[in-house]
Amino acid sequence: MSNEKPQAGATCPVTGQTGTRPEPATARPALSNDERRTLILTGASRGIGHATVKRFSSAGWRVITCSRHAFPENCPWAAGPEDHIQVDLADPRDTMRAVAEMRERLLGGRLHALVNNAGISPKGEGGSRLSVLNTPMDVWRQVYEVNLFSTIWLAQGLVEELAAAKGAIVNVTSIAGSRVHPFAGSAYATSKAALASLTREMAADFGPLGVRVNAIAPGEIDTAILSPGTDKLVEAIPLKRLGAPEEVAKAIYYLCTDQSSYVTGAELHINGGQHV
């Protein structure tokens, strides 16, 4: 289950490491501004987001990452802080401030892809699941601001740049949005269900502008934030294994490129058959 949550510290979006200086990144052949495509990615530093940075970067894309933390000084990413934006998506005012900064950084006023991957799934005491009965009001509001509303503010604020590039938007939902999940809280699950519905609405609204909008719904993905007991869920997955972040990143890449040029308003299930 895709279940990104606030981080304890900054993490390099390329290596996924903190605290130690990793090996330098391999240099890529330089591309002109006209040739190079640009992705803005939220929730970039861990799990699915980290794998997505690597997938797009390896294809020569410029990747502008967004997170609550400043860019770590020990990260070897050539773009460095010039392609990183610190933003608290739980604060709509800060989100709009970040949108203005994004627009300033976009070369030629064109954005080829926006991937809304950031999400939070708060837990109760001892990592327990938060249900409808015990989720505080402020937690509901925080979860919905990050997981749902920030997607709207980013898309609204970057619509001109997306339209200029005939770009694509990918929203990261979750298998928890379509069924009660043993670990995902009620606020997280319902925000992801709403995001799936929002994806359809956005596809209809952005389509006439030449912008495609799709969603991916990951299931149990092997990341550092898996909840204890996830291994028991694997028994019910037809492929009998967890998914890899790289497998999700490949699907995101597909939905952002011409390979999916006639696909919009879709939600792609990436869960090894767990939903069947």
Image: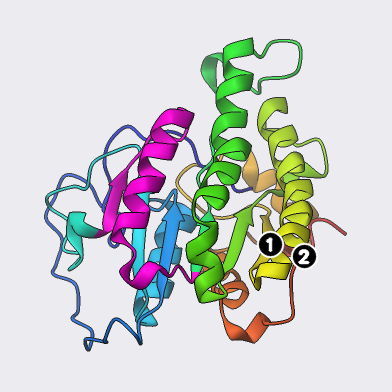
**Is residue 169 found inside the magenta-colored segment of the image?**
no
Report x, y in % for residue 236. Answer: 80, 53
Would residue 34 be found to the left or right of residue 120 on screen? left
Toward the viewer: 172 or 95? Answer: 95
Q: What amino acid is labelled 2 in the image?
A: Ala
Say whether residue 129 is left or right of residue 78: right
Q: Could you say which disc has been placed on residue 206 in the image?
A: 1
Q: Quadrant of the C terminus?
A: bottom right
Work out whether residue 106 or residue 146 is closer to the camera in this orientation and state it: 106
Residue sitting at the far right: 276
Q: Is residue 241 above or below residue 127?
A: below
Q: Where is 95 relative to 245, above or below?
A: above
> Tag 1: residue type?
Phe
Q: Magenta span covers which residues?
A: 83-112
Find numbered disc 2 in the image and state the secondary structure of the residue it sits on: loop
Identify which residue, 174 or 18, lies in the foreground.
174
Q: Position of residue 261 (x, y in %)?
A: 67, 82
Mark 2 = which residue?
266
